[in-house]
Amino acid sequence: MADHQADELEQALRRAVRGDVSFDTASRALMTMDASNYRRVPAGVVAPRDADDVAAVLAVCRERGVPVVARGGGTSIAGQATGLGVVLDFTRHMRGILSLDPERRTAVVQPGVICDDLRTAAGAHGLTFGPDPSTHSRCTLGGMIGNNSCGSHSVAWGTTADNVHELDVLTYGGERVRAAQGLHDLPARLRDGIRSLAGQHLALLRTGFPELPRRISGYALDELLPEKNADLARALTGSEGTLGVVTEATVRLVEAPGARALAVLGYPDESAAAEAAHTLLPYGPLTVEGMAADLVAGATGLPKGGAWLFVEVGGATREEALSRAQEVARAAAEATTDHTVVADPAGQRALWRVREDASGTATRLRIPGRADGAEAWPGWEDCAVPPPRLGAYLRDFRALMAQHGLRGTPYGHFGDGCIHVRIDFDLLTEPGIRVFRDFSADLADLVVAHGGSLSGEHGDGLARAELLPRMYGTEMVGLFSRFKDLWDPEGGLNPGVLARPQRLDQNLRFDPLPRRPVDVEFGYPHDKGDFSAAVRRCVGVAKCRNESVSGAGVMCPSYRVTGEEKHSTRGRARLLHEMLAGEVVQDGWRSEEVRDALDLCLSCKGCRSDCPVEVDMATYKAEFLHHHYEGRLRPAAHYSMGWLPVWLRAASLLRAAPAANALAGVSPLATLAKRLGGIAPERDIPELAHEPFTRWWRDRVREAARETGAGPVSEPGRPAHGRTVVLWPDTFTNHLSPSVGRSAVAVLEAAGLRVVVPPKPVCCGLTWVSTGQLDRARTVMRRTLDVMAPALDAGLPVVGLEPSCTAALRTDLPELLTTDPRAARLAESVSTFAQTLERYAPDWQPPRIDRPVVGQTHCHQHAVLGDTAERRLRERAGLTGTLSGSCCGLAGNFGFEDGHYEVSAACAEEQLLPSVRAAEPGTEILADGYSCRTQLTQLAGRKSRHLAEVLAERLR
């Protein structure tokens, strides 16, 4: 579309609709892809407020011959949520549950309703919405209706089509249609056309569709048969937005069991599990899910075996559910290698998390001898065959992959005969794409030979529609085109999808990416040093779009505050992808759109652990900022907070802390300093310590030497005889909270460890990394390695107290200094305070404190370091309770930067501040991160402490 046409279209839409009209570069770039291999660039995006807005958009686009694509959560795997023309984004405004009738067990919803929101609302009445794809926490009902989504509970509750009662639909021509059973309410044109189509081909419609629970491919024209009372709602479900736009849906609800239990059955191999799955259906399970060892290697809690079936059953009580699960396990015992039955809800959630993350984890295949694995892609994600044939089909499927030199790890809905798989297609080269095409054709024939459906859940989209003649024959596919023309004679709704499809090897999202690695600063060791491959990690499953975080999860705090796609990890990855492609985002590293999207990234690193494919947006942000500001003036905060270690060290050398603190207390001077430093005016300037930790340490060592007449020792008057450990004096501990360092020394020595401190200043470089000053970060890191070289040569463990700095030593330092072997050695030697005690003083018993705790697990602790040792140490000390997940919102320099205060405070309000306010008197507030402690002080007026301080106090 020419620029002047796009401008005129945008203005016409702005005049016609009340919703959001976005034709800017970023909005278009965010909608180029879904969770598939495909990419199509829209002209613009509209977020309608109601059905009238949708009608207005269709009218404007119809007058100009512009296509329209309806989009929900954008997690479609076959490419049907991509498109040219105008994309309708229903997730912003049209997301209401309009009514819920517990007696009739129905709900009326708008298309943008999140599946889990409906399930939660229904749960208040003991009901649920049956279909639950693995993306149930972020996919929308409109998207589920478009794809006829299923999920793991379809063996009990069926597909979305089985749970749709009525649909309100707008056609591209502007007709408003109420789709239900019967054709009497239809406009005459549609009523007569459907009767003619069905009446002329009754025999074909009765015999041309395979009988299996997961037949999703093509249009469900058999639902138009008179014996089915022409169920138009079911016929439209799964039509992928090619026939009409759903503006409202009446869906059926089902009774939720009072309790559930999970029988996990181990089998010798995948084929044995697949062949057993259908034999368990007579026991009335809610789910029968299968996966093999090549997908879940390393997962804990699984019984012995090479493959597993997860069989969930329900009951009115926990005892009844447990009894039924045990009955399933007994019935399967002859074929299983081992089993376990889990009735505890937390234990079940942990196991189901392995399954739900599989759509992401399967994109990085585990290959023996390769730490980075191999990229794997959808495309043949969800074929389905009759359940009794699944074992034979899987054997043939794996043989076909081997024949084409491909690898994949099947898993999925074994009870329904539907598998998911990501395959290591080479979609970057012409030979690889030819293999992709040839394999697709051969696999289509294999599926049909087993009596199956090319799609068993995710629809045909751009990925499989070209091959529908192999499944249905040309006559049936001709009827699909007639049905499309009946509803959409102008071809304006999602063209190229399902009917008259484009080739399956067109529109691949990798086509515009550079074929040679981009020059970058980080090593990207898990992506072979290729920044493009790192960005390709995001496959769009959108776990980062979860609107609430459970447990200790972190990702993605800024999205949960703003609700904007560009502030999700997926959105930022999409913009980086388009930056590399250079078609929509054309300014490369200088792109303001990418900069603006990354501006609210807290660099919390939550995505590094919480994203199923371990996207590391904090690293990508640092990389981008380095190139974006290369040779240019930076924001003031990059100089004030990026260089914070230098300014604090200078203040220490000049003994200027008292004067600096006094000046910070003078309001006009503090205001001026914050303005010059790019610091949020709402923030207080933290107080500097009068005596830095390293000065205290030097004085202590000198005093000990005087008293003993010997060299430096760990404790005055009594040398320690345990393992020597190096305490890392990070910038925050050293200059801003030295009591943490002093307390750590006391505890480590009480545990029998000999503590030493580097003889010269050291720094992890974090503040320069987080502001993208990577050349300076390297200089600082190399200087640090020079200081640490003797300790590394001696094999001494390094104890980190500040989680962010410890995580930087573990990840940022070796990934920036890839050619310096000392960097990897330092990273391997670093442990947290609790990890050090557990590893090197395992018999030490901490003092009993016996007090409840609240507080914050630092984001970097969660994402990089893990907090298992910390939780065990707290337990041994009698500190009971769970610390908050999510993010405190301060996140180093982020919360101090001008313009970030509101988002920073909102992040803290998600979990941390409410938990602290609700704490009983006498509860200990724990926060090992300086940022977390500062946030609590400034937003809640509450003092919190490092675990070392709490333990040291009791020692005294």
Image (tube, helix red, strand yellow):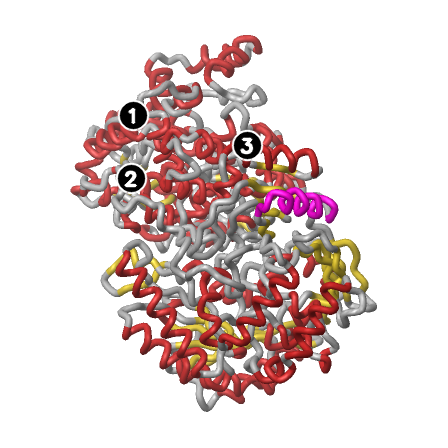
In the rendered structure, the answer to whether residue 183 lies left or right of residue 379 reads right
**Identity, as a three-letter code, of the amino acid under mark 1:** Arg
Q: Earlier in the sequence, mark 3 or mark 2?
A: 2
Q: Earlier in the sequence, mark 3 or mark 1?
A: 1
Q: Residues within 10 Å of mark 2 (few under 14, many from 20)?
A: many
- Residue 875 visible somewhere in the drawing: no
Bounds of the magenta segment: 51-66
* Residue picked out by circle 2: 522
* Residue picked out by circle 3: 935
Q: Earlier in the sequence, mark 2 or mark 1?
A: 2
Q: Nearer the viewer, mark 3 or mark 2?
A: 2
Q: Tell me: residue 163, above or below residue 3.
A: below
Q: Alpha carbon of mark 2 to alpha carbon of mark 1: how far?
A: 36 Å
Q: Nearer the viewer, mark 3 or mark 1?
A: 3
**Identity, as a three-letter code, of the amino acid under mark 2:** Phe
In the image, 873 versus 667, the foreground residue is 667
**Identity, as a three-letter code, of the amino acid under mark 3:** Gln
* Residue picked out by circle 1: 698
Helix, strand or loop at mark 2: loop
Residue drawn at x 22%, y 34% is: 785
Q: Residues within 10 Å of mark 1 (few under 14, many from 20)?
A: some
Q: Alpha carbon of mark 3 to alpha carbon of mark 2: how far?
A: 30 Å
Specify whether residue 884 is painted magenta. no
Residue drawn at x 56%, y 81% is: 208
